[in-house]
Image (cartoon, coloured by chain):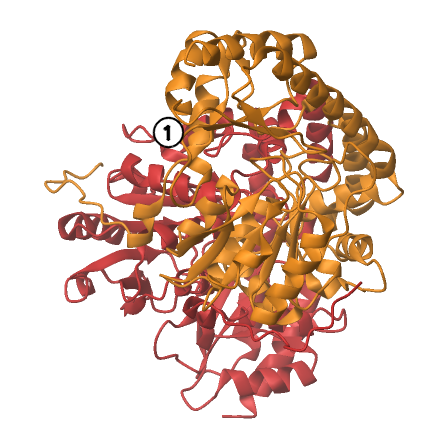
Chain colours: A red, B orange
Amino acid sequence: MKIENPNPMQWRFAERAEQLQSSFIREILKITQQPEIISFAGGLPSPATFPVDEMKIAFDKVLTNSGKVALQYGPTDGYLPLRQWIADSLSANGVKIVPEQVLMTSGSQQALDLLGKVLIDEGSRVLVETPSYLGALQAFSVYRPEFVSVDTDEHGLVPESLDKVAQGARLLYALPNFQNPTGRTLSLERRHQLVETCARLGLPLIEDDPYGALSYKGAPLPKMVAMNPDGVIYMGSFSKVLTPGIRLGYVVAPLPLVRRLELAKQAADLHTSQLTQMVVHEVIKDGFLDRHIPQIRTLYGDQCQCMLEAMAQHFPASVSWTKPEGGMFIWVTLPKHINAMALLDEAIAAKVAFVPGSPFYANEPETNTLRLSFVTVSPERIRTGIEILGKLIAAKI
Amino acid sequence: MKIENPNPMQWRFAERAEQLQSSFIREILKITQQPEIISFAGGLPSPATFPVDEMKIAFDKVLTNSGKVALQYGPTDGYLPLRQWIADSLSANGVKIVPEQVLMTSGSQQALDLLGKVLIDEGSRVLVETPSYLGALQAFSVYRPEFVSVDTDEHGLVPESLDKVAQGARLLYALPNFQNPTGRTLSLERRHQLVETCARLGLPLIEDDPYGALSYKGAPLPKMVAMNPDGVIYMGSFSKVLTPGIRLGYVVAPLPLVRRLELAKQAADLHTSQLTQMVVHEVIKDGFLDRHIPQIRTLYGDQCQCMLEAMAQHFPASVSWTKPEGGMFIWVTLPKHINAMALLDEAIAAKVAFVPGSPFYANEPETNTLRLSFVTVSPERIRTGIEILGKLIAAKI
């Protein structure tokens, strides 16, 4: 009963759909998933850290005690006890975050999409770090902003550089802790400066913090949202401290904004899985993360140290790199004349993979940069892979 | 360490954020959740049908056998065995749907958002039924289309009425089986006509089918996607046949479109929970739905029949209503002079709730219409509630 159709469909897409590009990283990941490749390209947390047993027990418990509620439609803003837990965890130094400010999202990627949807018109100026998180550039791109790259150095974003570009901008997006892709941390002094500058300029500041808990050395620096909860939008995630596959994140925003975000979420997917939210609350409510996160820190910290030592041994002297104090990434700067994209082809032929730095730049890319992740690779393979990479780089100098 | 901020933030939202309105239904639901109110307002499936034990066993099995995979990031398009199952279930009459055409979404609401994002520019003409599903109007509204209401009668959408409005339109959105809000079904003859007309006009046809399996009388009518898989976009959901709280739906589209939708989904939330997809596949792969769905049909069918009988007994002769052969809703048309919004105030005072029809119209509303749902109310309370409603209506005639 299929009809005969004389006119093949001519698809006409929305203009914004022309902006859509697949993440370069996800494309690389497809190539590098063969087990013989030593891949430093991933942005995935290590499955060795996933608390499978705790999740299994919690699913059983929630379904047994509250199955009919957990499996029914739920409120758009999210499961209140979990939102309360998040609000409490962010309330510090006399600043109180209330659960009404917390919107649960389907991973923190969705928070980026909702923020773009609610804050960005076509041509809006959007300020980002140099380089910035690729997933944020992708999410915002759909809404067709004009990206402005803000100066960034080894201490993170440079607050003084904001005045000259902030006029009329809609938001500043920053990732202050162990940034993706650079691994850099915004210094405490700069946090204060940045929050004050944004408040003075009336510029909404997005503090994206997926890696904040993964500090290898002492306590993390204070969060900017606690310095000015009326002007800072905080994004968090359970992907790096629990598991990413369940897709659970959150955004904490001043009330006028969070209400708009909630309406945008209602239109986008009604709400995030009730069951998932109840299970995560069940797992974490009695202090599980306080015991669990130190194990992740130790694992990642040891592998980071291993990679840094191997780089010191095998990389030529004209190569420089960041020394992250947490998170998942090291950022490498090669001599100017070496193109990391060309290097990748050679590396893959030699069974090693990484992510070239160019896609992380909103504007002019520095083609001699690349990102390395150490979290899913054993120390032995880290040493082997870095040695191979060092030889390939040395051959170009 | 909170900063003193002399300038309270002046929020500037994107123009599209001005379109955002809370679903009127969700607002009514907040009022009507008190247990003493007999609510026909819900659009929620009955929790009595949720297969809690089967879900619990499946979560345990998937986490035991594949925990590290289920909890890791997954592919944007979804879990392949589930996409294969969906493709197979839609392949009929010699038409083959392939898994590459299937994109898993976070509920079918997300499919609506992604379709709007990829197909609608500001001012694009979007054709919808009269009345149409409120959630679709909300999702599309974000992208600021010009809605065109297409003529609809008791057999559903009128295909002949398309020619005069289709010129330059971006899509036609239709809900052919037991439509929300009217409960109407598009006749077989009209399905063929509609598919042929859309193909001739080059107009993408969205076939939204959340209730298709919930047929009370015999086999459901053939799906339009099987009549022209090159021009019809099919949307399905596990919310009404399994459980809604897990947020799992899908869209099946021709390859050029599904690729765009996948890119839009990657930017919107990376992917839908791997764990949820693997669990749903585990539950359904051996024919569970073939045993489970008849139970839902019986429960809903009996309650629908009960409501129809009570309406025949208690509603004045000048009131008319649809006689659905499946799904969750009955649509009531009052005498012209009765405003359903005003009636709702009186009904809530008398402890009965429903949804007025106006929000379901993209353009001029018929204010004398309302929607009743029978699925979560016991027969006894259905009879009581309909009797109260009948008296309130009679008093206005």
Residue B127 horizontal/vertical position (percent):
49, 55
Name the kind of residue labelled 1 in the image.
Answer: Glu
Q: Quadrant of residue A160?
A: bottom left
Residue A99 horizontal/vertical position (percent):
39, 28
B223 vs B329, left or right, is: right
Label 1: which residue?
A100
Q: Quadrant of residue B310?
A: top right
Measured along the vertical axis of the image, is residue A363 above or below residue A57?
Answer: below
Q: Nearer the viewer, residue B260 or A87?
A: B260
Residue shown at 65% from the left, 74% from the top:
A385
Q: Nearer the viewer, residue A281 or A176?
A: A281
Residue shown at 70% from the left, 16% from the top:
B306
Task: Give the position of the N terminus of chain A as an image quadrant.
Answer: bottom right
Measured along the vertical axis of the image, is residue B350 above or below residue A267?
Answer: above
Kindly tell me whether residue A41 is visible in this rendering: no
Disc 1: host chain: A
Residue shown at 87% from the left, 33% from the top:
B291
Residue B233 horizontal/vertical position (percent):
63, 59
Residue A383 horizontal/vertical position (percent):
65, 70
B10 vs B141, left or right, is: left
Q: Nearer the viewer, residue B256 or B350?
A: B350
Measured along the vertical axis of the image, is residue B312 above or below residue A112?
Answer: above
A393 vs A48, left or right, is: left
Q: Quadrant of residue B254?
A: bottom right
